[in-house]
Amino acid sequence: MKLIYSIFIFLILLSSCANIVAPTGGVKDVDPPKILNKKISEKEGITNISFTFNEYIQINQWEEYFYVSPPVEKRIRKKIKGKSLTITIEDTLTKNTTYNIVLDNCIKDNNEGNILDSLFIILTTSDKIDSLTLRGKLQNAYTLTAVENAWIMLFEENRSDSVIFKEKPNYIAKTNKNGDFYFPNLNNKNYKAVSLTGFDFIYNEEEEIAFLNTLVNAEKDSFISLLSFDPIIVIDSLTKDSTIIKDDSIEVDSLVKDEAKYGKLNIIIGENKQCLFQLFQNNKVINEFSFYEKPFLITNIIPGKYILKYINDIDRDEKWTTGSWKLKTQPEKTTNYPSEIIIRSNWDLELEWDLN
C-alpha cells in the first residue's frame, strides 16, 4: 500500500520540566531540541519515520508518553543515533485512515535535559486527512478531581459492549495532569466513549472506568465530560443520625444544652428530593446529613471552615453509590459548593446553591 502522508509538528517549550544545571561559563541552554529535517518512507508494510535534531538527544519516559491512535497491533520500535530519531511501525496501516503518533515529552536534549513538550505526527493512508476534533475532561465521580494518565477510548457504535473486555478501541487519547484530553483528526462516525486506567485497553472489571450513555460524534460534539468511578467502592454513611457533629472532646449532652456554641446551615436549592450533604475538612468527611425533602437545615455544627458536597441520592440509601458498566448506570451525581463555607457560633448561615 502506498502511504500518503503529511507531517504536522507542534512544539511547545515547557521550561518547568527542564533539568537545568548552572554552567561554569557561557549562556545557559534552556531550549528543547529543534527538528531540522524529517522523512517518512514505507516499504512492504513497514513505515519508517526519521527526525534529525539540532543537538544530541535522549529518550524521556517513552513507555509512559508515547502512543499511536488508532492503536496498532505490533510493538513500535525506536532508535536514537546521535542527533537522529527513527520510529519504525511494522504493522500494515489500515486503508483510508488518519493516524496520530504522539510523542508528548518523549524527547529531551542530552546536556541539560530540556524536554520537547509536544510532538504530533499525522499520517494518512487516504487522499485526505480526517479533520474533526474532540476535546474533553475526565474527573473522579466522587471527589471531582482530575484523573491523570488515563486512556480515553472511542469504539465504533456497531461494536458490542463486550468489546472492552477483549479488543482494542478505534481511537485512543491520554489525559494530562488536568484531566484534559484531545482527539484530533477523527472521521464522521458515531462512537462509544470509555475511559480506563490500565495500560492494555482491556477492562478487568476492578479498575476505574468512565463511560457515556450516549454516542459521540465529533461533527456535532466538540467537548465531552467523563466521570471515572471504581465499580466496587462503597462509601457508607458515617452515622444514621447525623444531625449532630460528633467530637470526642465534647459530651453529646452538652451539644444539646448549649446550642449557642454551634452554628446552623440552611441550604436552599431548587431540587426537592432525597439528597445527601457532606462536610469536609482537610479532605476528610467530618459528617453527613441525609434529607428526604425540604427544608435542608443542618443544626449543631461545630464552628470552622468546611467544604460542602451535595450528593443526589437517587436510590435513597443514604450513601454515595458508584456506577456499573454492565448495568449501564452512572454513579450518583456529586457537586462541591464553589467556595469554602464558614460556620460561626450562634449564627445561621443561609446558602443559595444553583446546582445546574
Image (spheres, grey):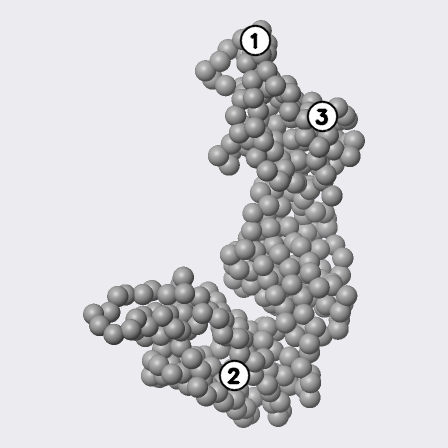
Q: Which residue is mark 2?
A: 90
Q: Nearer the viewer, mark 3 or mark 2?
A: 3
Q: Are marks 1 and 3 in contact (CB under 8 Å)?
A: no
Q: Earlier in the sequence, mark 1 or mark 3?
A: 1
Gap in angstroms between the C-alphas marked 1 and 3: 22 Å
Residue 209: tell me if it is visible.
no
Q: Residue 301 — which label?
A: none
Residue placed most toward the observer, 274 or 260: 260
Task: Farthest residue to the left: give it.
Answer: 24
Q: Closer to the N terminus: mark 1 or mark 2?
A: 2
Q: Identity of the amino acid at label 1? A: Asp
Please tell me which residue is depicted at 65% across the width and 75% down the height of the picture.
185
Label 2: state its secondary structure: loop
Which type of secondary structure does the marked residue at label 3 adopt?
strand
Q: Which residue is mark 1?
A: 258
Q: CA distance from mark 3 to mark 2?
A: 62 Å
Foreground residue, 192 or 37? 37
Secondary element under disc 1, as helix, strand or loop, is loop
The disc at residue 296 is 3
Quadrant including the C terminus: top right
Q: Nearer the viewer, mark 1 or mark 2?
A: 1
Q: Residue 7 is drawn in which quadrant?
A: bottom right
Q: Mark 1 packing: few (<14 Cα in 10 Å), some, or many (20+)? A: few
Alpha-carbon span between mark 1 and mark 2: 76 Å
